[in-house]
Image (spheres, grey):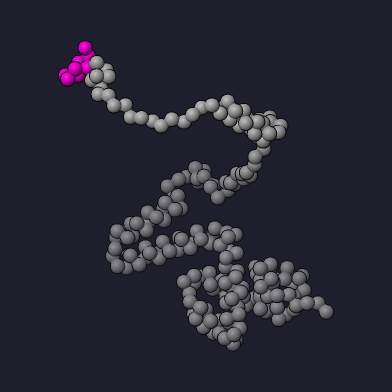
């Protein structure tokens, strides 16, 4: 008997698949219905990023006339899907930033707050780089970070490695220890001399 797939796995792989692709997967009608329900509420969640869990559950029950446990279960799945969107794409964050700017501008306009309107407009223009021609805009999002891997291999710099390096180091340490064996440490004593006497200067600072 074929095992029923986990709903979260189905959503991760086919949340936005076409009807033809979903049909080709051979999901049962129950699973397809659940998938469509999750897709619908997922889109609603993106459109209402500030929503509370209570609001989600209320909206879910109004739309689908289903029990509260089902709504809570769907909410848990959507919360697992949202981080995937954040890590996979910056487009939604860009769209959301612009939406927040527009909302701020509209609220400031209703209050007659011209300073906030000006700041919101400047932020919008700067973020969207509207002052640049299209061909001048640098596609920073397409720049790939150069990968770096730590290594102790000197050949990557074109340096020939020294064979038995540690043995050579130990030999040099023993050599210099032997050469300095007769050296005694002495304590430093402060010179008790006046500068004018030491350098032959009189009280006026002139050299004799």
The answer to whether residue 94 is left or right of residue 36 is left
Q: Nearer the viewer, residue 29 or 51?
A: 51
Q: Quadrant of residue 35?
A: bottom right
In the image, farthest residue toward the right: 1
**Whether residue 35 is situated above or below residue 199 in the rendered picture:** below
**Quarter holding residue 13:** bottom right
Residue 123 shown left or right of residue 61 in the figure: left
**Residue 185: x percent and y percent?**
46, 31
**Residue that lies at the very extreme toward the left in this rendered image:** 204
State which region is magenta.
Answer: 201-208
| In the image, residue 6 lies in the stretch drawn in magenta | no
| Left/right of residue 63 with respect to residue 2 in the rendered view | left
Q: Which quadrant is the N terminus positioned in?
A: bottom right
Secondary structure character of the magenta stretch overall: loop
Residues 16 and 135: in front is: 16
Query: Percent x, y for residue 82?
Result: 57, 68
Residue 21 vs 1, above or below: the answer is above
On screen, residue 66 above or below 16:
below
The residue under the point 52% across, 45% down is 138
Front residue of 84/138: it is 84
The quadrant of the picture occupied by the C terminus is: top left
Q: Report the number of numbered marks.
A: 0
Is residue 70 visible to the viewer in this orientation of the structure? yes
Question: Percent position (x, y) of residue 145?
Answer: 58, 46
Q: Is residue 14 left or right of residue 192?
A: right
Residue at image location 49% in from the left, 80% down from the top = 55
Give the farthest residue toward the top. 208
Of the pair 95 and 170, the residue shown nearer to us: 170
At a point 42% along the width and 51% down the height, the residue shown is 126
Q: Is residue 63 visible?
A: no
Q: Image point 60% across, 70% down: which residue?
A: 80
Q: Position of residue 98 (x, y in %)?
A: 45, 60
């Amino acid at each position: 008997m074929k095992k029923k797939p986990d709903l979260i796995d189905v959503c991760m792989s086919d949340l936005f698949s076409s009807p033809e692709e979903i049909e080709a997967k051979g999901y049962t009608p129950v699973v397809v219905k659940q998938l469509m329900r999750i897709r619908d509420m997922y889109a609603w969640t993106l459109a209402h990023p500030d929503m509370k869990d209570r609001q989600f559950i209320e909206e879910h029950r109004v739309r689908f006339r289903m029990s509260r446990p089902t709504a809570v279960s769907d909410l848990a799945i959507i919360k697992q899907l949202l981080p995937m969107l954040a890590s996979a794409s910056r487009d939604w964050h860009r769209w959301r930033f612009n939406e927040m700017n527009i909302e701020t501008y509209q609220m400031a306009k209703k209050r007659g707050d011209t300073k906030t309107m000006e700041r919101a407009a400047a932020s919008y223009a700067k973020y969207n780089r509207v002052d640049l021609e299209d061909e001048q805009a640098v596609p920073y999002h397409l720049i790939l970070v150069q990968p770096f891997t730590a290594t102790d291999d000197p050949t990557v710099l074109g340096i020939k490695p020294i064979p038995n390096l540690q043995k050579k180091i130990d030999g040099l340490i023993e050599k210099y220890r032997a050469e300095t064996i007769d050296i005694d440490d002495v304590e430093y004593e402060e010179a008790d001399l006046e500068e004018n006497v030491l350098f032959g200067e009189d009280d006026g600072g002139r050299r004799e």
